Each structure stands twice: as C-alpha cells, then as structure tokens.
Image (cartoon, helix red, strand yellow):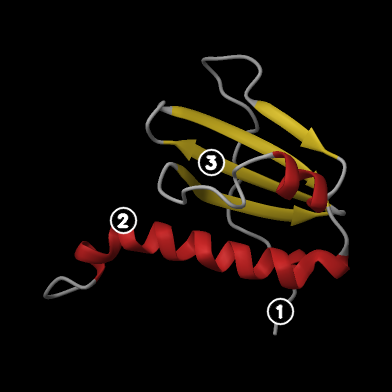
Amino acid sequence: MTHLWEIDHPYYCERGNYFKAGQHARWTSWQEFRDETLFVTGDRDTNLLFRWDWSDGVLSLFFMLQRKSYHVSHDVAVTREDEPEIRAWLTECAEALRATWEPILTADGA
C-alpha cells in the first residue's frame, strides 16, 4: 500500500481564494483540525473536499463550500501516525465526490 505522503498529484492547487482574503487556515495538528472544525465530522456535500496533498508533514486540504460558493484551504501539521485516521476520512470524502460524478461515470459508453 502506498503511503499518503508518497503520492504526488499532478499539477497543484493554490491555497486560499483569489477573490476573498482569509480563506486559508493553518492547524498545529490533525487532532486540532478534527476537533475544532466541522470539516471532518460535518456534511461531506456541503464541505466538498476536492483535493488533498501530503508533503513534508503538512496535509493540505482544498474544499468547495458549495452552499456559500467559497473555495477554502487548510494546512494541517500531521504525523505518519495520523495516516490511518486521515486515510479513512479521505476515503469518505472521495465517496462524496464520486457520488457527484457517478451518473456520468457509469453512463452507457463511459
């Protein structure tokens, strides 16, 4: 199994929001991010995670807050020991994203 920190996504995503300042936050730990926000325990559709990157002990998360039409990002300091919990959460987020695209992915001829 490939570790999350070994995955190199193509291209990149800019942190924050070009049109509105203050849409990027930094967290000192996965536990702080999990306990102090609703991004981990909240509605996956409302807070749609569309990208993540793990580099040098930082998990960068990119969300589209669909009801507000905001693109926000978070950098979370993480450890390798956090990986199992983060992987499980990312899998849940991927399922929410997949559900959005599923009708076209399973259409005839796809």
Residue depicted at x 59% and y 52%: 41
Marks 1 and 3, how far apart at CA = 24 Å
Image quarter where the C terminus lies is bottom left
Is residue 3 rendered to the left or right of residue 95?
right
Give the residue type at disc 2. Thr
**Which residue, given by chain and number where applicable, does mark 2 sit on?**
100
Q: Earlier in the sequence, mark 1 or mark 3?
A: 1
**Label 3: which secondary element:** strand
Q: Nearer the viewer, mark 2 or mark 1?
A: 2
Is residue 69 rendered to the left or right of residue 74?
left
Q: Provide residue 14's location: percent of width, then percent of height.
A: 62, 34
**Which residue, given by chain and number where applicable, does mark 3 sit on?**
63
Image quarter where the N terminus lies is bottom right
**Label 2: which secondary element:** helix
Q: Provide residue 46's location: percent of width, then percent of height.
A: 42, 41
Give the residue type at disc 1. Thr
Marks 2 and 3, how far apart at CA = 14 Å
Question: Looking at the image, do the residues carrying marks 1 and 3 touch, with CB atoms under 8 Å apart?
Answer: no
Q: Which mark is residue 95?
A: none
Residue depicted at x 58% and y 32%: 72
**Label 1: which secondary element:** loop
Q: Quadrant of residue 15?
A: top right
Q: Quadrant of residue 56?
A: bottom right
Residue depicted at x 81% and y 65%: 82
Q: Earlier in the sequence, mark 2 or mark 3?
A: 3
**Position above or below: 78 against 83:** above
The residue carrying pointer 1 sits among few (fewer than 14), some (14 to 19) or many (20 or more) residues within 10 Å by Cα, namely: few
Q: Evaluate whether residue 7 shows in this view.
A: no
**Which residue, given by chain and number where applicable, does mark 1 sit on?**
2
